[in-house]
Image: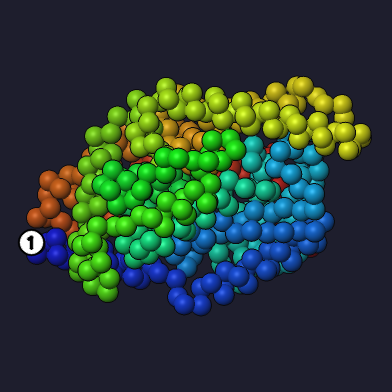
Amino acid sequence: MNAAKREFIRGMMAHYRASLPPPEHSVVIHELQKRVLDIGMLAVNKAHVELFGSHVSGFCTPHSDADISLTYRNFSPWLQGMERVDEQNNKRMTRFGKEASAMGMEDVRYIRARIPVVQFTDGVTGIHCDVSIGNIGGVENSKILCAIRQVFPDFYGAYIHLVKAWGKAREVIAPERSTFNSFTVTTMALMVLQELGLLPVFSKPTGEFGELTVADAEMLLQEFKLPPIYDSLHDDDEKLGEAVFFCLQRFAEYYAKYDFSAGTVSLIHPRRHRTVYERVVRRHLELLGSRKRLEWEKHIAEHKEDGPLDENDFSASMQNETTQRPSNSPYVVEDFVNYVNCGRRVQASRVRHIQQEFNRLREMLIDKESELKFDEVFRESDTVPRFQGFEGVGTRDHRVKTFRPQ
């Protein structure tokens, strides 16, 4: 191993180790969750909050954003899109924002977008929080990612941490600039491990709507074994670093060459062709729509004041589901629990930047391995314009409501 590579791997592993949450982190997050529940109890009837995202998967730093799903008595995920239910949820989120501000949360704002969210900074920890109503898919995804990481926490943890650190530094992960979010790039990184035989392919989903379930993933992971050589990587950061570096090289090489115009990123079927994704989505939405209609009819039968069933509302609700699963966007990265295309928000104008960054990473890690410098590979860039939406001038948008302590 050349000196530059050895020093790079040392820097890699030091960066990963420094990012790990302290032993008391689970207590800190639990206390944060309790504070959010206290707010929820003041805002909705029989509040329940569930954490999801990186603090559940384990692919986090101490200061990672906290994603929280809020539900309430008689909550049903099937009723989203029904006008009266959406209006009631709007009122719930508005009350939540007011109570969050009154309880000492900072920079509180409610964004009434397609997926409404209350954002704030926790006054105790400084952690940024996003609270949405009934994000069932996010909760399931996080549990599956947690199960994956548990197979070998340091190996998967170091690899995903470094991919994300690179992505954030190089504006490949920057949703406020219309590039990827962390979950999308995590999925992309994991598919490379599947191609290398370092993670099983979740090819037999058993969910009611064709989706992957937590039980599906856990069953397959219990049977999965990494190659025997990985047994020697425990408690040896030099050897572990070499294995992680190899995977980073393959990640860079894979996506520098990948034909995104034809293929999708999928943990259920790696390199699934877009036409196949279209068929899977079509069937998924048929099953989803049938169940949704049954749930709407049942709700209206029990709540006459919300009826009759508005076909326009129902069609708009299903159109919203379709909009989240396009096959014609520059990138198709499949969410493995409901086939949402997580890459859909990347604008065509960002494709060139992303491809340049994959090429740069491949060149630095492979072509110029003998000249490797950690600081240069992870050097922060600031070349992609900010998306002028909710994160920018859009804060004056009528859909964004801010709250200040009374």
Residue 108: image x %, image y %?
67, 56
Locate the N terminus by quadrant: bottom left
Figure disc tally: 1
Residue 114: image x %, image y %?
64, 37
Tell me, yes or no, if residue 345 can be seen here: no
**Residue drawn 89% across and 37% down?**
303
Locate the C terminus by quadrant: bottom right
Pick the residue in front: 86 or 140.
Answer: 140
Is disc 1 surrounded by few (<14), some (14 to 19) or many (20+) residues within 10 Å?
A: few
Residue 32: image x %, image y %?
62, 68
In the displayed structure image, the side of residue 21 where residue 377 appears, left or right: left
In the displayed structure image, the side of residue 348 where residue 226 appears, left or right: left
In the displayed structure image, the side of residue 232 where residue 183 appears, left or right: right
Pick the residue in front: 196 or 6.
Answer: 196
Pick the residue in front: 389 or 167.
Answer: 167
Residue 273: image x %, image y %?
37, 27
**Residue drawn 32% across and 46% down?**
194
Tell me, yes or no, if residue 191 can be seen here: yes
Which element type, helix, strand or loop, lies under badge 1?
loop
The image shows residue 232, relative to residue 313, as above or below, that is below
The image shows residue 150, relative to residue 269, as above or below, that is below
Callout 1, which amino acid?
Asn
In the displayed structure image, the side of residue 30 where residue 303 appears, left or right: right
Q: Which residue is mark 1?
A: 2
Residue most toward the bottom?
A: 24
Say how the picture is coloured. Answer: rainbow
Pick the residue in front: 328 or 203.
Answer: 203
Residue most toward the right?
A: 305
**Residue drawn 18% across and 58% down?**
373
The image shows residue 224, relative to residue 363, as above or below, that is below
**Residue drawn 36% across and 48% down?**
200
